[in-house]
Image (cartoon, rainbow, N blue to C red):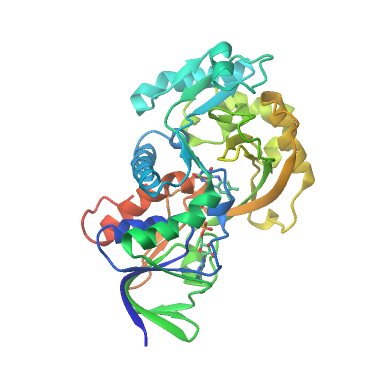
Amino acid sequence: MSREYDDAVVGAGIMGLAHAYALARRGRRVIVFERHRQAQGASVRNFGMLWPIGQPAGRPRQVAMESRAIWTDVLTRSGIWHRFTGSLHLAYHEDEETVLGEFLEQAPAGGYDCRWLSPFEATALAPYLNPQRLRGGLWSPTEICIDPRQVIARLPEWLHQQYGVEFEFGTTITGYDHPTVSAGRRSWQAGQLYVCSGEDFLTLYPEEFAASGLYRVKLQMMRTRAYGDEVRLGPMLAAGLTLCHYKNFQDCPSLPALRARYEREMPDYVGYGIHVMASQHSGGEVTIGDSHEYNEAISPFDKEEINRLILDYLATFLRLPELEIVERWNGIYAAHPAELCWTGRPETGVLLVGSPSGRGMTMSFGIAERLVRETLGEDEDGI
Ligand SMILES: Cc1cc2nc3c(=O)[nH]c(=O)nc-3n(C[C@H](O)[C@H](O)[C@H](O)COP(=O)(O)OP(=O)(O)OC[C@H]3O[C@@H](n4cnc5c(N)ncnc54)[C@H](O)[C@@H]3O)c2cc1C
């Protein structure tokens, strides 16, 4: 006999969990389906950086801050590990300092709360920084560090206990014929289906995904041994290459010149889309990444050359004692060239939600709240 729900969500990655939360807290009966015994996609493979500083002023920044508020509430109430670390973008060259200075000038108008730290202030906050040739850094207090592995393992449990959300792990949804959700011969009834299938564009609604403009991006990542309390990173860290990566810096007049220098002096880094960031989790382990390879360039095999370039660049700004990499992996996310988060409504009762690119952890709860409000007719603003 099939069971009845108000809403069914496909995918227990962060987008699926955020939609389940937005729906269940309204008192709706929700079921989440996940193909694996635990989600194994981008949501468990990332840095765990809730990074509103990376979003450009306007709507993206607004959604990021809304998302941050919901995350804070969820993390506090669930007791899932998190740390209000803030973030530090470091400058070791004059042109990097110039770009960061230009961003600081625009920051108040864009609603960013950040300030410049001298080398002395920066190393006081982040004691393992390389102090040589450090010119200073942009400090922002809004970033939160989470451990994606803990979030993905524990959030489903909390959603079930707190809001009665049901989970069917190890279940691949193969079709929806309103209101019947099917996984092979098994079926459930749900008035609305939210498809948060990450980079899987093939199982459900393949024509719509093929026409959406979404593309796939592969990143290589590493984790160090657990330092315990022996090494405290302080804020989450980024350096010069990151300035070309996040859109919050896009209106800085000196950015094209900085990019041109990197293209001249560091072509391998630019070619592999490498910029280097570091976050530290509850056991003191440091997560390091990343690179960007696209669509046809994505291979199942990782390139050791990329890992070496990442570690070489890391050493220019962070000196971790007895650095030992204990894990290497890659992750793939879906991205859209224009949309903050691509959505599609191919038929009655179906919402397709594309992953919001490399910012999905940051934006998830804000996007889900807005999409649920729109779908339930509470608000037409959407995302
Ligand atoms: C290496 C890496 C680092 C990143 N770092 C950050 C960061 O620090 N901060 C940040 O904000 N963002 C970061 N991102 C981006 C962020 O991780 C993603 O945007 C986000 O996790 C996407 O979530 P999702 O739920 O859409 O996709 P996923 O996490 O991939 O989840 C989709 C799930 O759907 C399931 N599924 C698919 N089809 C079906 C089906 N038919 N039936 C059942 N289940 C199905 C899959 O098994 C999967 O578990 C990073 C991404 C990567 C790859």
Q: Residue furthest front?
A: 229
Question: Residue 192 placed where, x, y %?
Answer: 32, 70
Q: Name the image quarter holding residue 24.
A: bottom left
Question: Residue 11 placed where, x, y %?
Answer: 47, 64
Q: Name the image quarter holding residue 326.
A: top right
Q: In which quadrant is the N terminus drawn?
A: bottom left
74 to the left or right of 315: left
Given residues 95 and 24, the one toward you in this image is 24
Q: Name the image quarter holding residue 241.
A: top right
Q: Reply above or below: 210 against 363.
A: below
Say which residue appears at 27% left-offset and 65% top-offset. Answer: 28
> Can residue 333 be seen in the rendering of this structure?
no
Q: What is the number of callouts on the image?
A: 0
Given residues 308 and 45, the one toward you in this image is 45
> Can residue 153 be seen in the rendering of this structure?
yes
Question: Residue 179 placed where, x, y %?
Answer: 33, 79
102 to the left or right of 286: left
Question: Residue 160 placed where, x, y %?
Answer: 38, 63
196 to the left or right of 260: left
Say which residue appears at 61% left-offset and 24% top-offset. Answer: 258
304 to the left or right of 101: right
Q: Reply above or below: 312 against 361.
A: above
Say which residue appears at 42% left-offset and 35% top-offset. Answer: 56
